[in-house]
Image (tube, rainbow, N blue to C red):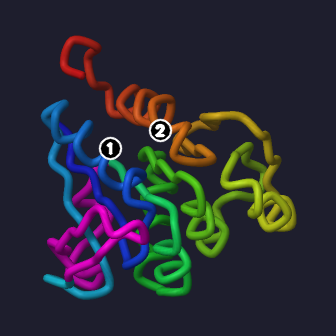
Amino acid sequence: MKKVAFLLAAQFEDSEMQKPYEAIKAAGHEAVIIGLKKGEELTGKQKQATYRTDASIDEVQADQFDAAVIPGGSSPEGLRLNNGIQQFVQHLNKQDKPISAICHGPQILISAGIVQGRTVTSFPALQDDLTNAGATFIDQEVVVDGNLITSRMPSDEPAFIRETLNKLGTPVGQR
């Protein structure tokens, strides 16, 4: 199966991490939590979920992964200016590997410079940021543009997870 990076910092939106993480693992894929420091304990903004990073961004290479998921909340703001995070996402994008970003997750895509000319969605407050970065913004539950999968908010999680699993090539019977 596939190896999927979850890019995570503190104050993530709990369900936007929990539900895709559990769905990807349930489908038989390997889920690896990557943060700025290995072994760091990260708590969601709703205080309903806590995860420990498996690796720091400095310890991994994009070539080791088949895809990435970027949960929303305040987590992307804590990661977006890190050169390692930007390079990781840029490298995945160059290899046309799936990158799934929900809610504020597209902040990382903006900072990595990979949204120009792409069609995406996000939490509504990022619409101007995405447009200014050269993206076409569409307000719908999930937007798939090539290797990019984007969604707006927790209520969009079923569509976000479905399209992420589709890009991973997970057979319907294994979901």
The kind of residue tagged 1 is Lys
Residue 118 in the image, given as x and y percentages of width and height: 73, 47
Magenta part of the chain? 41-66
Q: Residue at x 47, y 50 (%)?
A: 99
Question: How many other residues sit within 10 Å of disc 2, few (<14), some (14-19) or many (≥20)?
Answer: many
* Number of numbered discs on residues: 2
Q: Which residue is mark 2?
A: 157
The kind of residue tagged 2 is Glu
Q: Is residue 56 magenta?
A: yes
The quadrant holding residue 165 is top left
Question: How many other residues sit within 10 Å of disc 1, few (<14), some (14-19) or many (≥20)?
Answer: some
Q: Residue at x 45, y 62 (%)?
A: 13
Residue 23 in the image, given as x and y percentages of width and height: 26, 36
Q: Is residue 7 above or below residue 4?
A: below
Residue 29 in the image, given as x and y percentages of width and height: 17, 40
- Whichever of labels 2 and 1 marks the residue nearer the N terminus, that label is 1
* Mark 1 residue element: helix
Confirm or deny contact between disc 2 and disc 1 (CB under 8 A): yes
Q: Which residue is mark 1?
A: 19
Taking 114 as reference, is 8 left or right?
A: left
Taking 38 as reference, is 20 left or right?
A: right
Q: Which mark is residue 46?
A: none
